[in-house]
Image (cartoon, rainbow, N blue to C red):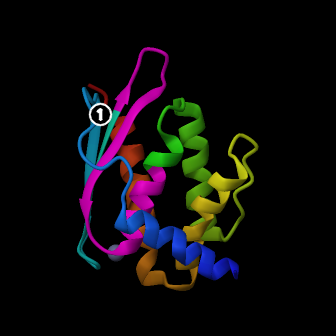
Amino acid sequence: MELKELYQEIILDHAKNPRNKGKCDGYSHDAKAHNPLCGDKVHIYLKLDKDKNISGLSFEGDGCAISLASASILTETLKGRDIQFIKKVTDDFLNMIKNKTKITLNSLSDDQITTISSLSGVQEFPMRIKCATMAWHTLLSALENKD
Ligand code: ZN
């Protein structure tokens, strides 16, 4: 299978069966965003525990396949990890989309890297970049909203 097809399959799978959809129990932070260009909406919920781990991470949203897949992949990849790790992966992801760099984090498995990289296809479609990056920017906003 070509890489492009594999990426497409991953995106469709996440868009059709989003992981971690809904509000997570006892969330401590949340943030939402709207992409008027495409009509995408996303609301990120996270639960930060005492050890600075994101023990709960989920989203509610509606929109195109890219935006749903992006939010679903984000929650699946980052749930249960600590803040430092989350910020590093988010930086790497946004760099990949904007600057076409590769994800090279040692602490991600090959499967996780393939899954995240599936969204790199939007590099060729400037109108869709926001669809892919919105959930990740929203996660960073949620982390900044201290309660
Ligand atoms: Zn969209």
- Kindly tell me whether residue 123 is visible in this rendering: yes
Quadrant of ligand 1: it is bottom left
Residue identifier under label 1: 29
Does the residue tagged 1 have its C-beta within 8 Å of any atom of ligand 1?
Answer: no
Q: Residue at x 54, y 40 (%)?
A: 86
Q: Which residues are magenta?
A: 47-74
Q: Is residue 19 above or below residue 4?
A: above
SS at badge 1: strand
Asked whether the viewer can see residue 43, the reply is no
Q: How many marks?
A: 1
Which residue appears at 59% of the width and 73% of the height?
7
Amino acid on which disc 1 is placed: His
Q: Nearer the viewer, residue 31 or 78?
A: 78
Considering the image in quadrants, where does the C terminus appear?
top left
Q: Position of residue 31 (x, y in %)?
A: 27, 45
Q: Quadrant of residue 141?
A: top left
Q: Position of residue 126 (x, y in %)?
A: 48, 82
Left or right: residue 58 compared with residue 107: left
> Looking at the rendering, which quadrant does residue 70 occupy?
bottom left
**Residue 23: horizontal and vertical position, in percent?**
23, 41
In the image, residue 95 lies in the stretch drawn in magenta: no
Q: Position of residue 39 (x, y in %)?
A: 23, 74
> Callout 1: 10 Å neighbours few (<14), some, many (20+)?
some
Task: Inspect the magenta stretch and tell me whether residue 66 lies in it.
Answer: yes
Q: Residue at x 45, y 63 (%)?
A: 133
